[in-house]
Amino acid sequence: MPQIRAFRALRFDPDAIGDLGRVVCPPYDVIGPELHQTLLARHPANAVRIDLPEVQAGEEPDDRYRRAARTLSSWRVDGTLRQDSHPSIYVYEQTYRVPGSGQVRMQRGFFGRLRLEDLLPGSGVLPHERTLSAPKEDRYKLLRATGVNTSPVIGLFADPSGRSVQALAAITSRRPDADVADDDAVRHRLWAVPEDGPQASFVKSLLDGAGKSPITIADGHHRYETALRYRDERRNNKTGETDPGADYVMMLFLETTKQKLTVLPTHRIARGLGQDGVRDLLDHAQWLFDVKPVADRAELEAAFGSADEPGGKGRFGLWTRNGGAILLARRDAFEMSHRVGGAALHRLDVSLLQAALDRLCGIDAAAIAAGRLAYSKSVSEALDWVDVAKDGADAAFLLDPTPVVEIAAVAAEGDVMPQKSTYFYPKALTGLIINPHEW
């Protein structure tokens, strides 16, 4: 079973930096070049300087990681960052508007240290996503240089007893230690809760609740696998440490049975089909789907514009410059397409669509690797790409969100989902807390 512990986090000192909102940032993998420059200019101590250090003119490629380490060290010396005196968990609350709807949601969880486990059958940690070598190499070089986790892995746990949710509610009834809104108007609040303090019973409830069954990685697979590599390197160096900090990774634990989490779909845009390919696609879609033509793109925007629409029904939107349709999968037509994986993987909408793209468009794994698919989280953007033939876009396939329960089921069966199957929203801020690999 998972082993979860409190830790002494590094946190920005408000007296040193002023407005906390100016020094936190999104996780590295959602920061584009323009936002990167904005964050660098926002504050000289913005966390992006250590989580995504820029490449400066005249530097060798790896110099930026060493510069991040020097920056981190200087912030610790001058008091910009201070380490908490007591091992704690850090309760985290996010309040946000669901994209594509007017609904406001709140989710709560807590940051702790998870003891690393190899991702093998029987492990207490379950992945659901394949990783790519380039992001892992980048994160490894940063971790090796700095010796800290700047951004958390996101883990899902189930505590049907409700005790975890009750503990979170009790802790969040008091004034938070940090309260900040990000550029997307998401409100983030944080409470530091020492394991030996007056709320120790709540800490125990949360650690016990999250440690009763395997943790499913929701986001941060690259960070987790990087942490495994770093752990193994430290062990091979025979540092002699007892229970070293490098045996753990910082994780945000989210309970899944008593609160509704938001998973946004990632729509697919097929390139290079040509006029004949588009015509054949519309004609042959009936091989796999019940096809309901739509009058215009507005009908698709209305049908797929809400992140609240439950997925898992085998429903898709199709748009081309020759028209569009709502597609409902006939699951028996896909049976011959299921060559590998278990039942949970086969049920996924993204698995059905992947098989349909192969059969109807000739877009298989090799074609995907060659760039025949583009991706968008916006329905309107996906349709716009087709309307203007951006970068050869010929057809947009719209999806409903993947239910959290299906993600956990795939992970529990030891399978991984197709790339870009899930996008958990909102993202945890980088810079609220940092996990140093020390006690």
Image (spheres, rainbow, N blue to C red):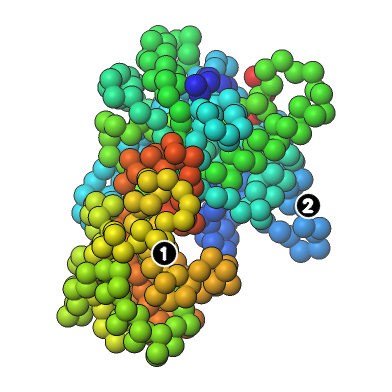
Could you tell me residue 366's position as x and y percent? Answer: 57, 69
Rendered view: 13 above or below 281? above
- For image coordinates 78% across by 52% down, the residue present is 63
Q: Three-letter amino acid code at disc 1?
A: Ala
Residue 333 quadrant = bottom left
The residue under label 2 is 63
Judge the density around disc 1: few (<14), some (14-19), many (≥20) Cα neighbours within 10 Å: some
Q: Three-letter amino acid code at disc 2?
A: Asp
Judge the density around disc 2: few (<14), some (14-19), many (≥20) Cα neighbours within 10 Å: some
Q: Residue furthest front?
A: 336
Q: What element carries label 2?
A: helix
Q: Is residue 121 visible?
A: yes
Q: How far apart are marks 2 and 1 (CA)?
A: 43 Å
- For image coordinates 19% across by 77% down, the residue present is 294
**Between 129 and 34, the one nearer to me in the picture:** 129
Which of the numbered marks, if any, corresponds to residue 173? none
Rendered view: 47 above or below 318? above
Could you tell me residue 178's position as x and y percent? Answer: 42, 32
Q: Is residue 183 visible?
A: no
Rendered view: 216 above or below 46? above
The residue under label 1 is 355
Could you tell me residue 432's position as x and y percent? Answer: 50, 36
Which callout, 2 or 1, points at the residue further toward the start of the chain? Answer: 2
- For image coordinates 76% across by 30% down, the residue present is 234
Q: What element carries label 1?
A: helix
